[in-house]
Image (cartoon, rainbow, N blue to C red):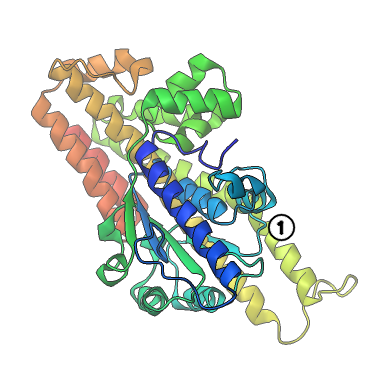
Amino acid sequence: MAVWDDLVGQDRVIEQLAAAARDADALVTAEAAASGPSPDASGSSMTHAWLFTGPPGSGRATAARAFAAALQCVSPDRAFGGAPGCGFCEGCHTTLVGTHADVEVVRTDVLSIGVKDTRELVRRAQLSPAGGRWQVIVLEDADRLTEGAGNVLLKAVEEPAPRTVWLLCAPSLEDVLPTIRSRCRSLTLRTPPVAAVADILVRRDGIEPALAAQAAQATQGHIGRARRLATDERARARRAAVLKMPLRVADMGGCLKAAQELVDAAAEDAKQVAEEVDTKETEELRAALGAAAGTGGRLPRGTAGAMKELQDRQKRRATRTQRDSLDLALSDLTGFYRDVLAIQLGSRVALANADARDTLERVASASRPEGTLRRIEAISACRQALDRNVAPLLAVEAMAVALRAG
């Protein structure tokens, strides 16, 4: 299996990345043979900084990790014209499983990436590759860099170490500082076709074809969400509850109750993540700090700051988990009203929520297209309010009332 196999519906991007990987391999090989300064790279498809953009679920991070693996490929077939990225050699395998010494993959589970963490990344980027090929930094959430962190990163991208490659991922070009994106080669991924997503769920995850097709259609080509929907019964139940919300906002009491339940469900998701992760993290840190058994769990003097820093990070992660859960629900709700609009306009496009057709037709017959558009705008306004740190319950209540009035 090649490193590109999990990159669905992105033939053009794969072609460009494969060409760059071949040129990168030629540069490293020529440099090693010359035992001197790096050869002239003019005309090469390879560059030191890349920016992967595309809608959620398009596979931005998957593309970046696959490219990182191709850059580290050490397959002997390369000497006979084979393309880097075999998927089997030590370089490919260790990169894909996250253990390669020269590949740092950064993903954040909090709301933003600050200056401190970025400075550590920049320090790492100045190191020479331990394995003799490339030092690769994959930043999956470049859109979450604070302004100060972006300025720290800018100098490293402007003046990289000779064998360092930055792979940045963001939803769109506008989500990255102009000064950074102007120094990167941009690759834009598209939303994968629904059929291609269903196919990979069957091939890679062993999901029954009918369920795979339904999950792919419901998520409109979002690979990660489709997999979760196909494998997690709780996710399917949560989506079913969200799709019933349009029938529950007939009066003010129903609006407020539906909003409260939506926020409570998101908070429950955050709580479950905390139960799964926080306790383990806390125990590991206490052990690392030397909290000895038989001392009542007391930490050694001078270590309270490290514990406080972990607790603060866990709180920020809980906030992001709740926001992400709400955003997922709002995406499902937007898809519902798009289907309603399609029915009202007599469109022949495939419905994302065909399994809820009775509810869709009921809502469509009780309203007009203009009202449906206003409801979609209300959901968008709710998402924007959450991005501005408006209290979740307040934002969702305002949306629920607008859904009723629309």
Q: Position of residue 101 (x, y in %)?
A: 66, 64
Out of 387 and 22, give the one closest to the viewer: 22
Q: Position of residue 279 (x, y in %)?
A: 69, 58
Q: Residue furthest bottom?
A: 302
Q: Position of residue 256 (x, y in %)?
A: 31, 40
Out of 116 and 336, give the one closest to the viewer: 116
Is residue 30 visible in this depiction of the protein?
yes
Give the residue type at disc 1: Lys
For this view, does 106 lie left or right of residue 293? left
Is residue 108 visible in this depiction of the protein?
no
User: Quadrant of the image for the C terminus?
Assistant: top left
Q: Is residue 346 depicted above or below 310 in this figure?
A: above
For this view, does 230 lie left or right of residue 206? left
Q: Is residue 235 depicted above or below 188 in this figure?
A: above
Query: Which residue is pictured at 49% across the width and 30% down the height?
Result: 229
Quadrant assignment, res 242: top left
Out of 56 and 105, give the one closest to the viewer: 105
Residue at the disc numbered 1: 280
